[in-house]
Image (cartoon, helix red, strand yellow):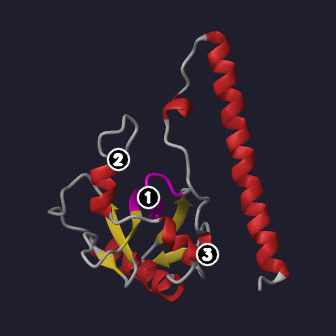
Amino acid sequence: MLSRRSLIGKLAAGAAVSAVWSVGVARNEADASTGAVSHDALAPAPTAPPPWELLRPFALGAVVAHGWRVAELSPVVDGACVLTLRNERGRAQRIHLCGNDGQPQGLVHTGRLDLVVMNGGQGDLPTEEGLAQAIAAVAAALAANEHAPQVAALLPHAERLRRFADTADSQLR
């Protein structure tokens, strides 16, 4: 049975997704009437809102480790959400939170999640120690929350590449 707080949270998340979807539909209809093609029309639609519950106790702006902060968490798109960490110097690093099917490909993984650093390499570029420790701290939080229902929307990275690598606006790497 859902608590009142959980129910209200789920309703708020649903309302937010509905509002974003409505704005997108309105933009697409406006673009259709003018013949224009918007970038939003080409972008993949989110399948779930940002899963902030997985990151608890971290929230937007929270220091994770070694000066790295949570800068953003995207909605789930193409089977993953993107966690952006930013350091004190303003450098940003994207980490895709993917499902773990027993063959993780990320820098760090938990029993059900895989954290894939998106640095333009193919798994062969080094990761600076402070960032690696920040990602490990995120993984510890994820491990404590990985039984949340939001994990079901996340696909393993290899499956994401197989399904979505050829889409026009894909950012799988």
In front here: 44 or 85? 44
Residue at left 78%, top 62%?
12
Q: CA distance from mark 3 to mark 1?
A: 17 Å
- Residue 89 among those drawn in magenta: yes
Kindly identify which residue carries mark 1: 79
> Could you tell me the amino acid type at mark 1?
Gly
Measured as percent of width and height from the top left, residue 152 is found at 50, 70
In front of the other: label 3 or label 1? 1
Dot 2: within a 10 Å radius of its alpha carbon, few (fewer than 14), some, or many (20 or more) residues? some
Residue span colored magenta: 76-95
- Total labels: the figure holds 3
In the picture shown, does residue 67 fall above or below 26? below
Residue at left 55%, top 30%?
41
Work out whether residue 108 can be spotted.
yes
Task: Tell me, yes or no, whether the two marked residues, 1 and 2, touch with CB atoms within 8 Å.
Answer: yes
> Could you tell me the amino acid type at mark 3?
Glu
- Secondary element under disc 3, as helix, strand or loop, is helix
Kindly identify which residue carries mark 2: 164
In front here: 141 or 76? 76
In front of the other: label 3 or label 2? 2
Q: Quadrant of residue 56?
A: bottom right
Measured as percent of width and height from the top left, residue 120 is found at 25, 51
Dot 1: within a 10 Å radius of its alpha carbon, few (fewer than 14), some, or many (20 or more) residues? many
